Amino acid sequence: MRRLGWCAALLVLTTAAPVEAARIGEIADWNFGSQAARFFSLQDPSVRYALAGSMLLGLCCGLMGAFLVVRKLALMGDALSHAVLPGVALGFLWGMTKNPVAIFAGAVGAGLLGAVVVQWIRATTKHREDAALGFVLSSFFGVGIVLFTMIQNLPGGAKSGLDGFMFGQAAALGPEDVWLLAGVTVLALGAVGLFYKEYVLTSFDEGFARSLGWPVKLYHYSLMLLLAFAIVSALQAVGVVLVSAMLVIPAAAAFLLTDRMGAMLAWSAGFGMLAGAAGAFFSFTGRSLPTGPFMVLAAAGLFVLALLFAPRHGMVGRLWRRRSRAARIRRENTLKAIYHVMEDGGFREEVVAVGDVAARRRETEAGARRGVAELQRAGLATEEGGRVAFTPEGWQRACEIVRNHRLWELYLTNAAQLAPDHVHDDAEVIEHMLGDETVRRLERRLNYARRDPHGKLIPGLADLAAGAPPSGRAAGCAEKGAA
Amino acid sequence: MMKDFSTTAPPLEVHDLTVAYDRRPVLYGIDLTVPAGSLTGIIGPNGAGKSTLLKAVLGLLPLSAGWVKIFGAPLAQNARRTGYVPQRESVDWDFPVNVMDVVLMGRYGHLAPGRRPGRADREIARACLDQVQMLPLARRQIGNLSGGQRQRVFLARALAQESDLYFMDEPFAGVDAATEAAIIDLLREMKARGKTVVVVHHDLSTVRDYFDRLVLLNVRLVAAGPTAEVFTPELLQKTYGGRLTILSDVVQSLGEEP
């Protein structure tokens, strides 16, 4: 694979004339603006063909790619797209012209042959899919390169544009190519729409599908045929080397966004179309730039966005949830420390000194002040002149946390037979995670116990509801003084 | 609901079934009849061909020899009367489907190609999910389930097939005690409704409790019949201890031939 990548990079470097590249750089601003205007006005028929073709191929590849990705067959797209190359060359040799029908037929034939060889190697040798795919990919591609070189050395002028099959040139798309793409897209949409349940079940659980008496092989090869159609019709625009990226990347991005197959197909097709349009745009505005790489870069950009911002599986969301959980735990620990200081004073005072909180937390006074400031921002406590007081909500949260901690300690000593001096560290972690439901179950299980294993009072529902420390009140936590 | 099977063929009849991987037989000359309304366990050591037997009967593997009849006809004619619970590891649990989607797949055998499940199918699927106490999890992606819950999803899918003969591949493997109890209750209820259930099982300690008939398998059929008759030390010794019989030697040499 890496060697192919190098080969591709070398070919790009040698085909793009460096002199011209420099000139584009000088007049880039003016050129880009007017080209962009031409692109968006859609006056130019070649722009219309390029845009329509690129979006159609994005849709079609996105649809097929979604099935490849959920079947863990992403590399199959890679192998097939390289395997079609000798077919393209043979299709050209058939009439020595770029006859789309002959090239299409040759390429589909070569692609299917590749798929069959993969199956055959898997079935008859001890090799798994990866080795079979690697073999088909590189050997078919090698044959294709040899044939292409031979064609280049033949006399005759009709062979210009054949190198478009390597890296793609959306600008070179003609009406026949667009009609071909439209036909393939309609076919793919129709097949997936009609046989949605069949394709999903055979992808998810092949054994079960076969136990229903379904012709699973038929569905597999019809999908491979559609895949070959999609690849071949996309060749002209993206090129052999990168068409597999259009199969894999939009689908991989869609997979991160959803947990349902139908939605994944829609996202994947949408991403494909977006990437296709972006590729056509950049290919048109930057002169003689290949379309394939830009299309793939756009798709890769979408993938990175999905990776970062997907609601459930996205990295930003995960990081955010982790950080907000860490902040919540910090706040709850400060609340608990304030509670403990009050408790030690027998709840005679409604305010405590920040210095006492720091001592209790075994941290510096500056650290405690930061913690109290966080509580103030969250509306859980107020601070003035180095003295802190709970808000009603803060008092309730503090009671809940202490209560969770002590209930859990009691549960561990009672139910799990742990010694009282073994349970504190565990409770330190669990106290932040117990839900209301679990707390109620714990209470029932512990018979609404009033004291934890260390003899301290467990804050009761009355304390939670009171909204303020029970200074002066006889009930609840204030009993501590008497106990 | 109870069907009169006395006039019909047995749910499963297997004759001289042989399956070979690469010319090496993994099942050899199996003759087997499973009577209607029975709860049959297939037991045997690892590599005895228990799962292979299920797959061969269901047409998932090519037969080297022999035939299989489901209710007196080839499987293709009676596929709708046959339900299947594959091994849990056989599917990718990251697949983008939710619990309800999977249970609905049980209805697919009743739907013509190109037809989607309708309201009636959804009602059946909901009822089956409820039966395995999984209805509240209907909208969950299947990767977010415990091992026992995954097994119950597969069972609900099989129930939704509304078949008469069920094949289950190790439904008790790696599930929690609560799920195991729920599964065996379900199997007994199915039996009470006249269904026939064939289960690949690996835990010998529960065999006597769970199954009224047993198939002892080790490449060849060692014994098949009512549990009380075939669950004996001698037959178990023959099934689990007889690794060095002449047959095993022949199997070995067959596999080594170029």
Image: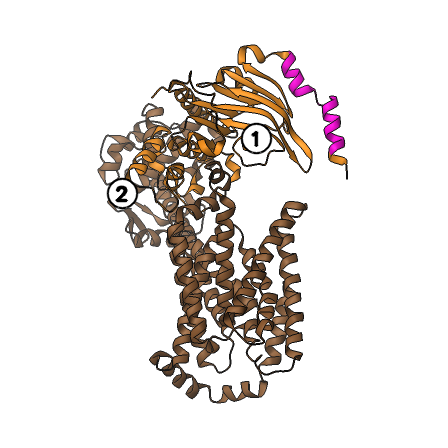
Nearer-the-camera pick, B204 or B51: B51
Residue A134 falls left or right of residue A307 = right
* Mark 1 crowdedness (10 Å alpha carbons): few <14, some 14-19, many ≥20: many
Residue B105 falls left or right of residue A436 = right
> Residue A376: which disc?
none
Figure check: A70 above or below B43: below
Q: Where, by quadrant of the figure, is residue B200 drawn?
A: top right
> Could you say where residue B146 lies in the image, as x and y percent from the top left?
45, 36
> Residue A350: which disc?
2
Task: Please check the rendered image and state whether residue A94 is part of the magenta-colored stretch, yes or no.
Answer: no
> What kind of residue is marked 2?
Glu
Q: Which chain is brown?
A: A
Mark 2–mark 1 Cα distance, whole angstroms, equals 70 Å
Chain B colour is: orange
Q: Chain of mark 2?
A: A
Figure check: B143 above or below A366: above
The magenta segment is B234-254
Front of the two marks 2 and 1: 1
Please name the residue that numbered disc 1 is placed on: B51
Q: What number of labels is visible?
A: 2
Nearer-the-camera pick, B186 or B158: B158
> Could you say where residue A316 lies in the image, as x and y percent from the top left?
42, 57
User: Are marks 2 and 1 in one subunit?
Assistant: no
> Could you say where residue A164 lies in the image, as x and y percent from the top left?
54, 75
Figure check: B194 above or below B228: below
Figure check: B233 above or below A4: above
